[in-house]
Each structure stands twice: as structure tokens, then as C-alpha cells.
Image (cartoon, grey):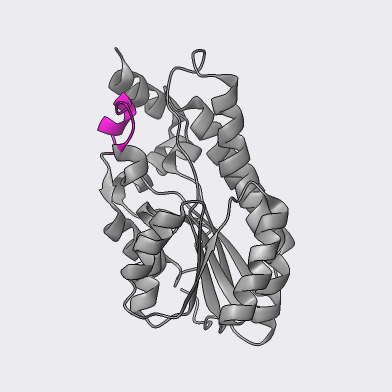
């Protein structure tokens, strides 16, 4: 376990209008951190703000698909809450369906939001995080993938592909930022009991292997995991088993997935 302290500065939380982002923002606020909260849903952001009980928070309605808007938001956030030292990038979307039946527009949206949105956040904030780390301590850049980004599953082809891309990008970025004081992490949570999952037309069969988990629990365990030096952050035993099988016993996991998702 690392004993290095965290860099001083505010936390950026994207996707803060609901789900994991909202809960991570709430828990960070309860610890006294200044926040910059981003979401494309202004109403959801306002609801999150009401939960923060007077915490110092900058709110921004921004779509992470728009790099220039993200860069402008970074400037606004710094002016309002000071140096930005940590990022938890939760903004994302989920589309489900058989791989050959999903529309090209759904595939495109998943890549643009989940993958390119992660790239845009990293591009806009990398210098800021390095500057914060240069004053002492380490900065965290947490990108959210999924256990579906470790091993794809039926009816999640487009989503899994976008989350695999996040993981690959983060691996390269971690190596490139080594020694700068910026620690790049990838959170790979199980499905969450969040509006994104609850609003699906149905639950893919693979969810029987990983039932939706409370956003409160995922957020608490994710923030606790930042005290360690792990690159991939896994928050429950099922996810750790899924990850281990995908690396060490892929044929066994193939059998499990096929059996679980058989019609």
C-alpha cells in the first residue's frame, strides 16, 4: 500500500447528475472536499447539489463529447474552486442488444461518449493534474470502464467495446504519465443499481452472474481503493473472480458465460 499523500485541490466528478457519479460526489462532499460536478443533465446536477449540504461545489452542464466545451469547463472550474487535483470520470451511456441487431448510431454513440469522452476529459485535465501534483502528493485520474470491459458478454457488444477502449487508453496513459505524480486508474464496477440500468428495456442474461450493486457501496469501495496503488479497481468478489477467470482460465469463463446467457 502506498503511503504517499494526495495532492491538494478540488475533485472533478463527471456524470454527477445520477448514479455512481452522484454518490461519489456525495461521499467526497461529506469529507470536506471542494468539487466540480459535471453532467449534461442540468436537472440531475441540481438534484445532486441539493444533497451536498453546503459543500463548495462548481456545477457545469457539459457534454463530454465536445472537447472544446470540456476545456472551457476546466477553466471555469479552476476559477471557481481553485486547483483541480483529482478526477473521477463517471459519465457514460449503456446500449444493449444482439451485436448484429444494434444500430450503427448506437455503436457510434457508445464510442463517442464512453471512449472519446474519456479521452477528452484526460486531454483537458492532464496538465492541471500534473500541476497539482507538482506541489506535493499525487493526483488521481480515475476513468470508469466496467467488468464488461474485461470480458465482453452477449447483448453488450457495443458497450463492452467502448469500455475495452477506455481500459486500453488508460494503460498507455498510465505509462506516459509515470513519474509525473498523476496516478491513472480504471474503475471496473459490476452493474450498478442506477437509473442507467433501471431504465433498460430488459436486463441481459449476463446480469444474473453480477446482479446490480448499490451505487453507495460501489462509490465507497472505489474511493477506498484509491488508497492503494492498483491500476484496475475492482469493488466486489464477483468482479475479482470474473477478472481472474478472464486472465487465467479464459476457457472456463467462456463456458460460464455461454451457460449463463443461453436462451
Name the image quarter holding the C terminus.
top left
Q: Residue at x 30, y 44 (%)?
A: 238
Q: Is residue 220 left or right of residue 130?
A: left
Q: Position of residue 95 (x, y in %)?
A: 45, 30
Identify which residue, 143 or 237, lies in the foreground: 143
Q: Which residues are magenta?
A: 199-210
Q: Residue at x 46, y 52 (%)?
A: 41
Q: Say whether residue 203 is magenta.
A: yes
Above or below: residue 91 compared with residue 12 = above
Identify which residue, 38 or 179, lies in the foreground: 38
Q: Say whether residue 100 is magenta.
A: no
Q: Residue furthest bottom?
A: 135
Above or below: residue 255 compared with residue 228 = above
Q: Is residue 192 left or right of residue 133?
A: left
Identify which residue, 41 or 78, lies in the foreground: 41
User: Would residue 58 be seen by someone viewing this image from the given angle?
Assistant: yes
Q: Position of residue 33 (x, y in %)?
A: 44, 80
- The quadrant holding residue 61 is bottom right
Q: Residue at x 39, y 63 (%)?
A: 46
Above or below: residue 206 compared with residue 55 = above
Identify which residue, 142 or 95, lies in the foreground: 95
Q: Is residue 91 left or right of residue 207?
A: right
Q: Main secondary structure of the magenta part?
A: loop
Q: Residue at x 39, y 55 (%)?
A: 44
Above or below: residue 9 compared with residue 37 = below
Amino acid at each position: 500500500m502506498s503511503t504517499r499523500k494526495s495532492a491538494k485541490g478540488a475533485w472533478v466528478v463527471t456524470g454527477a447528475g445520477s448514479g455512481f457519479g452522484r454518490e461519489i460526489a456525495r461521499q467526497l462532499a461529506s469529507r470536506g472536499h471542494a468539487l466540480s460536478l459535471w453532467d449534461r443533465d442540468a436537472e440531475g446536477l441540481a438534484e445532486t447539489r441539493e444533497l451536498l449540504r453546503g459543500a463548495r461545489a462548481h456545477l457545469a452542464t457539459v457534454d463530454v463529447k465536445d472537447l472544446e466545451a470540456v476545456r472551457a469547463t476546466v477553466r471555469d472550474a479552476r476559477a471557481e474552486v481553485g486547483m483541480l487535483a483529482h478526477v473521477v470520470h463517471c459519465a457514460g451511456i449503456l446500449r444493449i442488444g444482439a451485436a448484429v441487431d444494434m444500430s450503427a448510431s448506437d455503436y457510434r454513440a457508445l464510442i463517442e461518449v464512453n471512449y472519446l469522452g474519456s479521452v477528452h476529459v484526460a486531454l483537458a485535465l492532464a496538465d492541471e493534474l500534473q500541476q497539482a501534483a507538482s506541489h506535493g502528493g499525487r493526483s488521481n485520474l480515475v476513468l470508469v470502464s466496467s467488468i464488461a470491459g474485461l470480458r465482453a458478454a452477449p447483448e453488450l457488444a457495443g458497450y463492452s467495446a467502448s469500455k475495452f477502449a477506455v481500459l486500453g487508453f488508460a494503460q498507455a496513459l498510465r505509462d506516459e504519465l509515470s513519474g509525473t505524480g498523476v496516478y491513472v486508474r480504471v474503475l471496473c464496477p459490476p452493474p450498478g443499481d442506477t437509473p442507467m440500468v433501471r431504465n433498460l428495456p430488459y436486463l441481459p442474461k449476463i446480469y444474473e452472474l453480477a446482479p446490480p450493486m448499490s451505487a453507495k457501496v460501489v462509490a465507497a469501495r472505489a474511493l477506498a481503493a484509491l488508497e492503494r496503488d492498483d491500476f484496475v479497481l475492482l469493488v466486489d468478489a464477483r468482479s475479482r473472480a470474473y477478472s481472474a477467470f478472464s486472465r487465467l482460465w479464459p476457457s472456463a469463463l467462456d463456458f460460464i458465460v455461454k451457460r449463463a446467457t443461453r436462451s
